[in-house]
Amino acid sequence: MSDRLEVALSLQVPGFDLDVSWSAGGGVAVLFGPSGAGKTLTLQCLAGLIPPNAGRIVVDGHVLFDSASGVNVPAQARRVGYVFQGYALFPHLTVTENVGFGLRDLPRARRAERAAAVIERLGLAGLEHRYPRELSGGQRQRVALGRALAIDPALLLLDEPLSALDAPLRRALRDELRALLTDLGTAAVLVTHDFTEAYRLGDRIVVYDAGRVVQSAPRSELLWQPASESVARIMGIRNVLRGTVVKATPDRIQFRWRGQLLEAVNSPSRSYLPAAERPIAFFIRPEYVRLIRKDRGPADPSHHMNLMDGVVVGEEDFGTTWSLRIRLTAAGEPAQGDHDLEVEVPHLVYEILEIDRDRRWQFSIHRGSIHVLPA
Amino acid sequence: MLSLRVAILATVLNALIGVPLAWALARRRFPGRALLDLLVTMPLILPPTVTGYYLIVLFGRRGWLGGPLYQMTGWSIAFTWYAAVVAATIMALPLLVRTAKAAFESVDRDLERAAFTLGRSELRTAVEVTLPLARNGILAGLVLAFARALGEFGATLMLAGNIPGKTATVPLAIYTAVQTGEDAAALLLVVVLSALSCVVIVAANRLGARAT
């Protein structure tokens, strides 16, 4: 599929330097990264609110900005729908007036018709004459969306569209927004610093860090193959660790970590072959660490890969799961402060194994669950 | 009543000059912006007689503006009731401009950005979005400007003089009454002006409270 959206921006503002280039096909592109990474600045450049020093913006073949040929379509003429963080609804105008604000060029009757259609589509019927302060958070979000959609935008921009909402509502509206965006088929760029949100809403995820793009990939690829240790850390992946290579082959990597010899699957698609004694970064998802039951005899090293001994040094209850902090019995400093690994177990497992009484455990990690991060 | 006429005209002039000025100072970046801000604010800090002196230098019979005008028409604004209006306008301007500027600045920039993406020019955005949302702050500024214009003394005395029935506004009349020993007349005017000022402060506070 050809790219519907091509973005290359270079912008220097006091104390910040944005230099990014990415492209996206259809659907939703999510700009993901920590606060202050340049995500909102990118949206403002796309909308024409801030001119970049150099770059090129193309939406569905229409050049909106090109410093090389001197093209800079003003914000007013870009047909870009912008849902602002906090929504920026006009407080002195009603729902209908807000939604119809961008339709001034249409004749009065057409304008009313279009606004009514959008209000209906977003389930805001009955609220036409309310003012923004008389609406709930979820309703405000929909009015902001409606106001942006009313102009039939070529590109939809959404800046943290769910951050102003309470947690339960947030989850419900996230799935509702996903359905709406899929249904519309308008090219959209959404900004968030929440990885779950990025993963649920994005077809492609562009990871930002300090004004640069550190990875741009379809969402599933990003989830299982972060491009680097820094991407893994920005994504909030737990147990990002460092070891030393022993031997790497196209389908296996062996390495040393905390006195243990571990083995991981090498991704055939990337066949990463670092030399022996090179440092290596990897991560282990906390929910993929297996505790070995003691009532079934001693662990079998041929069956249980990457077998280790450890002690539970701390735990936190997350409602449906327990997060355990485990320290290896091996000598030396623990890898993550007071512990080496974070392990997540369901409540049921925690109760059956009586982990609250029994603190010493053997555990194993399948080689497919250790993910090596290219340097 | 002369004082009211002067104060109302000065307030209208403030609205016409001061509101666009406050918007420009709050939202536009242009060369000389800091200097303009300084000039508008000066009368707030300077002794009124100093402001009055500058006004004479500008509008007097031999002034930079008043001189050529006097030579062409034989008419000068000095010592007419128009001079009282000019003095009151300049003295009240900083109060309006500072209040209105703060009101414009308190309008969320994202609201203006939203209007731009929805096809509005900068000027239309100012009229349709920024101005209505800054309205209460601007009205509070106008009320304050009106009160200041009504109570203006020093600069008026310098530029317009104290001519009974012609340029003698209430504050000037109070001064004359005290000087000539007409204590009863002075007291009456003092009470009227004090009461009016109280009303104005309450009104300005109410408008200010609604603005937030």
Image (cartoon, coloured by chain):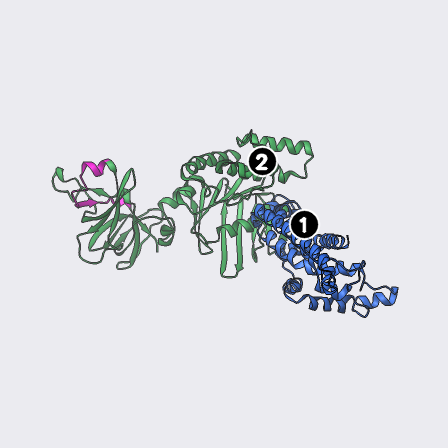
- Tell me residue B175's x, y (percent): 72, 63
Q: Is residue A367 magenta?
A: yes
Colour chosen for chain B = blue
Q: Chain of mark 2?
A: A
For the view shown, which residue lies furthest in the right direction? B73
Q: Chain of mark 1?
A: B
Of residues A307 and A117, which is closer to you in this image?
A117
Please count the marks in the image: 2
Residue depicted at x 66% and y 62%: B40
The residue that label 2 is drawn on is A95
Residue range corresponding to the magenta coloring: A348-369
Q: Is residue A308 magenta?
A: no
Between the C-alphas of marks 1 and 2, the distance is: 23 Å
Relative to B122, is A158 on the left or the right? left
Could you tell me which secondary element the residue under label 1 belongs to? helix
Relative to B195, is A163 on the left or the right? left
Residue depicted at x 39% and y 46%: A222
Whether residue A206 is visible, yes or no, is yes
Q: Amino acid at mark 1?
A: Leu
Residue depicted at x 76% and y 68%: B56
Q: Amino acid at mark 2?
A: Val
Tell me if label 1 and label 2 are in contact, CB under 8 Å: no
The residue that label 1 is drawn on is B123
Q: Quick one: label 2, few (<14), some, or many (20+) residues within 10 Å?
A: many
